[in-house]
């Protein structure tokens, strides 16, 4: 929520949000209702989403590079190189 409060003060946020709404055909005024929608979420809503998407057939993971994120810097014109390993 804090990011949202900061983001809405930035023109890039509005340009990206309105472009997304234009592309996906969603209601542009929904951007203004974000806080209310988040506050209206219930534990049941989150539970239902988790049951739908976090199934036995799906893996959700965040990989941490062996060297840490600080060393995984992107050089201009080159993709970031991230080394990671999976522990058993």
Image (spheres, rainbow, N blue to C red):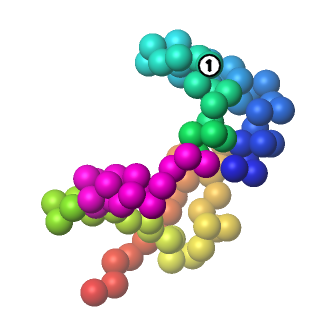
Task: Name the residue at 75% across, 51% down.
Answer: 2
The answer to which image quadrant residue 13 occupies is top right
Task: Name the residue at 27% across, 59% down.
Answer: 51
Horizontal and vertical percent position of residue 30: 58, 25
Horizontal and vertical percent position of residue 68: 59, 73
Task: Name the residue at 38% across, 76% down.
Answer: 85
Asked whether residue 75 is in view, the answer is yes
Is 42 or 26 nearer to us in this picture? Answer: 42
Task: Name the residue at 66% across, 41% down.
Answer: 35
Horizontal and vertical percent position of residue 44: 39, 58
> Taken as a whole, is the magenta stretch helix, strand or loop?
helix
Side of 31 relative to 14 (left or right): left
Q: Is residue 28 magenta?
A: no
* Residue extent of the magenta highlight: 39-54
Which residue is at the far left? Answer: 57
Which residue is at the far bottom? Answer: 88
32 shown above or below 64: above
86 shown above or below 56: below
Asked whether residue 77 is in view, the answer is no
Callout 1: 10 Å neighbours few (<14), some, many (20+)?
Answer: few
Is 11 or 55 nearer to us in this picture? Answer: 55
Numbered disc 1: secondary structure: helix
Side of 57 relative to 45 (left or right): left
- Is the C terminus in the top left, top right, bottom left or bottom right quadrant? bottom left
Q: Name the residue that disc number 1 marks.
A: 29
Horizontal and vertical percent position of residue 7: 75, 38
Side of 42 relative to 56 (left or right): right
């Amino acid at each position: 929520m804090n990011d949202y409060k900061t983001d809405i003060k930035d023109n890039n946020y509005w340009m990206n949000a309105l472009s997304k709404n234009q592309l996906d055909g969603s209601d542009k005024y929904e951007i203004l209702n974000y806080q209310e929608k988040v506050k209206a979420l219930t534990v049941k809503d989150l539970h239902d989403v988790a049951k739908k998407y976090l199934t036995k057939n799906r893996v959700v993971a965040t990989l941490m590079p062996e060297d840490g994120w600080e060393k995984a810097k992107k050089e201009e014109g080159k993709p970031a190189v991230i080394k990671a390993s999976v522990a058993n």
